[in-house]
Amino acid sequence: MNKLLTGLVSLFTLCQVGVLQAQTPRLVLLITVEELRSDLLEELSKEMPHDGVNRLLAKGRVYSEVQSPLLSADATASEAIIHTGALASATGISERQPTLKERSGRRVPTNSIFQDKNYLGYATSGNYSPLALTSPTLGDNLKSAYGSKSLVYSIAPRAEEAIIGAGVYGDAAYWIDGYSARWASSTYYSREFPWYIDKTNSGTSSLPARLSSGITWQPLSTQSRIPTASSFNHSFRKTTSDIADFKDSPLVNDEVVALVRKLFESSQLGKDETPDLLSLHLTVGNANKAVQGLSRETIESYFRLDRTIASLLQLVDAKSTLVILTGNGMSREYSPTVIDDRRLFKPDRCLALVNMYLHAEYGVQGLVEEITPTGAVYLNREIIKSNPKLHLKEIQSAVSDFLLEFSGISYAIEEHRLRDQAIANSDNATWLTALNSATNSNRPDVIFGLLPSWTAQDLSTERGVAKYQMTATTTTTVIMYPSVEAEKIDTPLDLREVSTKIAWILRIRPPTPRSILR
């Protein structure tokens, strides 16, 4: 009897293992699309064929109301949220270019959040590693679950998104160098640069060669129900600014797909029973070529994305590949063409006035080091610490009160009050998001925001104002896999929960426990 029970238990266990293996994907294709908007995707998909975006929308689980927890950020911060399910206070990643304090006290952008002089670059003079990441990614947890048998690759136009996609334990991350336009990587991942990528960087068909001759962006589609300008013609050449614009255009998606083909031909990705991860970063941006309203360039970007998605789906086995398409929950909001000086917030003028006020109140000069166009105030904490009559919280509150007297200021919140309120109101996502969207090393003493009709002056730009800012935008996430029921879900979904849903299908630990998502 005992032998019979033992045999039945063993048989049941083997059956269960077999079911689990059958349901576990061989490959996870995670596609993040920069600036993907739900409203445009829904409208423009009506004019698309059925082998690309519409295939995903028809056969996948569609979350049409995915919301970013960020009010303002760049693509790097959003990419970190998608892959980790956490904000900057946990991941260490708040922006592409963090600031470093100079001797003068002014903060200046660094090369990259992932700059690391301990590692050399392949096909790039940049030095990068993922060690700035302080939270595990989906790829990291996949490696933890399956060990070296699981392969984790990441491809993106920029180093930051590529590195986040690969995680700390990834096998490789590839990106387009901003100066040479070659596909690049870091010695962090391997001692040798793959021959097939090295070959891609040379010859007449390479991206550097084609940019040297000039690459033209013209419309693919001839008509659209949405009325816009009928045509356009933009060119990109091998200059630093043009390479940057090229990476912000939908043309870069073709380069990503071409490298994916090479990767599938030359690697073991998705070819055994152990699940692998391929993370891709695409865009529907307009490369700063059109800034007013719904442009023809933006519409064309969506049609080109559809073609890209169709090409990628042709490359994978639909039965064994888990496909995720998600926007990053951000889009560009451009500054007005004509700047009204009456509604222009000037940080330098504000800095001078607030320091005059604090000097009159406390008898100490230079208490405020910097006020940024992005709404951050940094105090000189060394002066405050060295003066026993000065108290940090008191100075923060004084600055906050002073800012609220300024025209155009919508709100001003001191760091200590933000922290207290976040703890006291644990269910208040606004407080927590504002607190956790900055790293500890770069958290401002006061944060403030402008009224919708106001623009912040930025003297580091040609126009004196930033060309655009990234703002939160409702996006779409689609999950397609045979075991995932096709349906449309209109209930709002936090972008931080995307990684959790992917991890559940893979039967691995989510990067961030649900208990600390908020």
Image (cartoon, helix red, strand yellow):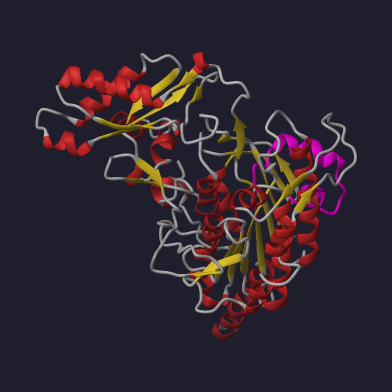
Name the residue located 52 percent from the left edge and 58 percent from the top edge: 164
* Residue 50 located within the stretch drawn in magenta: yes
Q: Would you say 188 lies left or right of 151 here?
A: left
88 or 249: which is nearer to us?
249
Q: Furthest residue to the left?
A: 388
Quarter that holds the C terminus: top left
Name the residue located 54 percent from the left edge and 46 percent from the top edge: 78
| Residue 341, position as x, y percentages in the image | 51, 16
53 or 178: which is nearer to us?
178
| Residue 347, position as x, y percentages in the image | 40, 26
Location of residue 375 with respect to 155 vertically, above or below: above
Quarter that holds the N terminus: bottom right
413 or 516: which is nearer to us?
413
| Residue 417, position as x, y percentages in the image | 30, 28
Q: Would you say 164 lies left or right of 488 here?
A: left
The quadrant where residue 209 appears: bottom right
Location of residue 425 with respect to 329 vertically, above or below: above
Name the residue located 59 percent from the left edge and 80 percent from the top edge: 10
* Residue 182 located within the stretch drawn in magenta: no
Magenta span = 31-60
314 or 294: which is nearer to us?
294
Location of residue 353 with respect to 43 vertically, above or below: above
Q: Furthest residue to the bottom?
A: 3
- Number of numbered markers: 0
Q: Furthest residue to the right?
A: 222
| Residue 33, position as x, y percentages in the image | 66, 49
Location of residue 234 with respect to 164 vertically, above or below: above
Q: Would you say 369 lies left or right of 455 here?
A: left
